[in-house]
Amino acid sequence: MARDDFLAFSIPAPTTDRLTLIGLLEALDSKIAVNDRTILTCIELASSLLQHETRTNETTNISLKEAAFWLSGGTPKTSEASYWSGDLPWISASSLKSFLIGDSERRLTAIGASSGTKVVPPGTTICIVRGMSLKTEFRMGITTREVAFGQDCKAFIPRGHITPHVFAYSLWNNQTNVLKLVDEAGHGTGRLDSELLGAIQLAIPSKERIGPLEERLAQLTRLGEIRRQESMRLGRLRDTLLPKLMSGQVGTSDAEKVVEDPV
């Protein structure tokens, strides 16, 4: 096409319905972004609360090795269809991207969950111990529901008087120290040696103070989890509505009614 013809080409103005569609999708994306910021704020507040507690009150340094029971995961046979596409999230080095661990793109059936992996309850801390992401960040978090996990991760269930959220945020606050321990397993893959990781020291509050602190950390975590679940619903709604709106299967007035309550 000649330049003059291209410049003379007229582009029709968007219709009212199309502008409404854009507004609906932007509203969904905006709410998801607000939720993401709220989740981050909840995590940062909980982290700061624990840091304040350990700076201003008596604590005991306990090694990571002694502070929790360690569990190793595994991968059920990926070629076995009956193991996959179930309801149980399976956490791996590629799916652990959030401190709040409650979902994964890959899910196991009941049969898959009992075939070469490990299932852990809510309140378990999981971290990546092998993967390319370890070269730049320490991915870890606390489970908000029952999940299974793969061999590139470790799971920790606190021992003694140490509570789940105090443990998780204590390890979260040690990210810089943990990253110093990462070596290379080859081909750019980072690796955390279990002995070195186990030597990390956690500052644990006294038995008298840990209970109230645990509840405050858990409340902030629950608030973040509520927002995370809401964002998942909004994301599914957006992905469902978009093709239907574009194809005309759903009118903008119908879509507005669907979006109104979630947003």
Image (cartoon, rainbow, N blue to C red):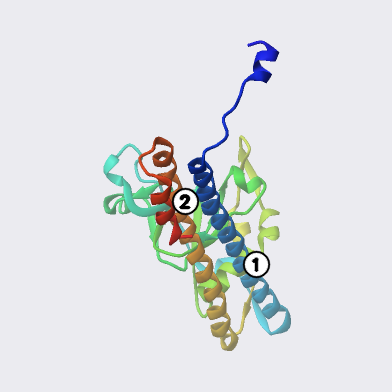
Could you say whether the residue bearing mark 1 is in a helix, strand or loop?
A: helix
Q: Position of residue 98 (x, y in %)?
A: 55, 56
Could you say whether the residue bearing mark 2 is in a helix, strand or loop?
A: helix
Q: Establish if 166 lies above or below 22.
A: below
Q: CA distance from mark 1 to mark 2?
A: 24 Å
Instruction: Specify few, some or many for label 2: CA neighbours under 10 Å numbering under 14, 14-19, or 20 or more.
Output: some
Instruction: Specify few, some or many for label 1: CA neighbours under 10 Å numbering under 14, 14-19, or 20 or more.
Output: some
Q: Which residue has dot 1 on it?
A: 44
Write the residue at 69% across / 84% down: 57
Q: Amino acid at mark 2?
A: Gly
Q: Which residue has dot 2 on it?
A: 235
In the image, taking residue 208 as reference, residue 146 lies left or right, namely: left
Q: Can residue 150 be seen? A: no
Considering every residue shown, the one lying at the far right of the view is 55
Write the residue at 62% across / 72% down: 46
Front-most of residues 180 and 51: 51
Q: Position of residue 74 (x, y in %)?
A: 41, 49
In the image, taking residue 167 as reference, residue 74 lies left or right, namely: left
Front-most of residues 42 and 14: 14
Considering every residue shown, the one lying at the far top of the view is 2
Mark nearer the N terminus (1 vs 2): 1
Q: Quadrant of residue 170?
A: bottom right
Q: Position of residue 177 (x, y in %)?
A: 70, 60
